[in-house]
Image (cartoon, grey):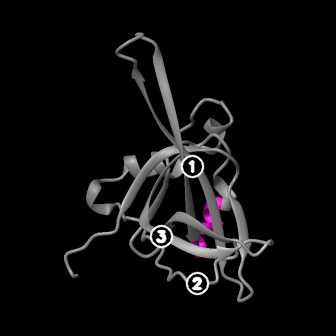
Amino acid sequence: MANDLNLCQFIGRLGKDPELRYSPQGKAFAELSLAVGKTWKDPNTGEKREHTEWVRAILSGKLAEAAGKYLKKGGRVYVSGELSTRKWQDQSGQTRYTTEIKVGMNGRMQMLDSPNQAQGQPRQQPQQQRNAQARPAQQQQAMPDPVDDFDDDIPF
């Protein structure tokens, strides 16, 4: 199945601050609760309608630590990664399933707001971005994406 593709992309707002946890081995994991939605006009009534879906995203390693440090409830964020469903037992022994986006080796997370903007304050251009715009394009260096393998010991 070499031609298959498992990639999901979402842009939305955080419904709560990221939950940052560490595995027993010390690896960081962050859970994001992302609200993605759509609006439309009802053709029968003309009323504006809205629908929100909640997407769970799991980040690991340095990307998880950055999310825990910089992302806040209400902030806009882009995530891409693999769709994954895992099976687990709740406290009463019932089998449960969780579907989530694993933002790992082939995924990305990008903050679309400054930390202040998530709290309703005006956006300020970061100093690093202003400096990068002042340099010629050939001198700009792209930040490498963190590459982390996902273990099955996600502590959520």
* Of pointers 2 and 1, the one earlier in the residue sequence: 1
Q: Which label was assigned to residue 84?
A: 3
Q: Residue at x 28, y 55 (%)?
A: 137
Question: x%, y% of residue 39?
Answer: 44, 27
Identify the residue at the far left of this view.
3
Q: Which label was assigned to residue 66?
A: none
The amino acid marked with disc number 3 is: Ser
Left/right placement of residue 46 relative to residue 121 reads left
Span colored in magenta: 60-67
Q: Main secondary structure of the magenta part?
A: helix
Q: Classify mark 2: helix, strand or loop.
A: loop
61 or 23, which lies in front?
23
Q: If the image is split into quadrants, where does the C terminus sit?
A: bottom right
Residue 62 within the segment the image draws in magenta: yes
65 or 85, which lies in front?
85
Q: Residue at x 66, y 30 (%)?
A: 120
Q: If the image is split into quadrants, where does the N terminus sit?
A: bottom left
Q: Residue at x 67, y 47 (%)?
A: 72
Question: x%, y% of residue 17?
Answer: 70, 51
Q: Residue at x 47, y 49 (%)?
A: 129
Q: Classify mark 1: helix, strand or loop.
A: strand
The amino acid marked with disc number 1 is: Leu
Is disc 1 surrounded by few (<14), some (14 to 19) or many (20+) residues within 10 Å? many
Quadrant assignment, res 82? bottom left
Identify the residue at the far top of this view.
45
Q: CA distance from mark 3 to mark 1?
A: 16 Å
Left/right placement of residue 63 relative to residue 143 reads right
Q: Classify mark 3: helix, strand or loop.
A: strand
Quadrant assignment, res 106? bottom left
Residue hosting label 1: 34
* Of pointers 3 and 1, the one earlier in the residue sequence: 1
The amino acid marked with disc number 2 is: Asp
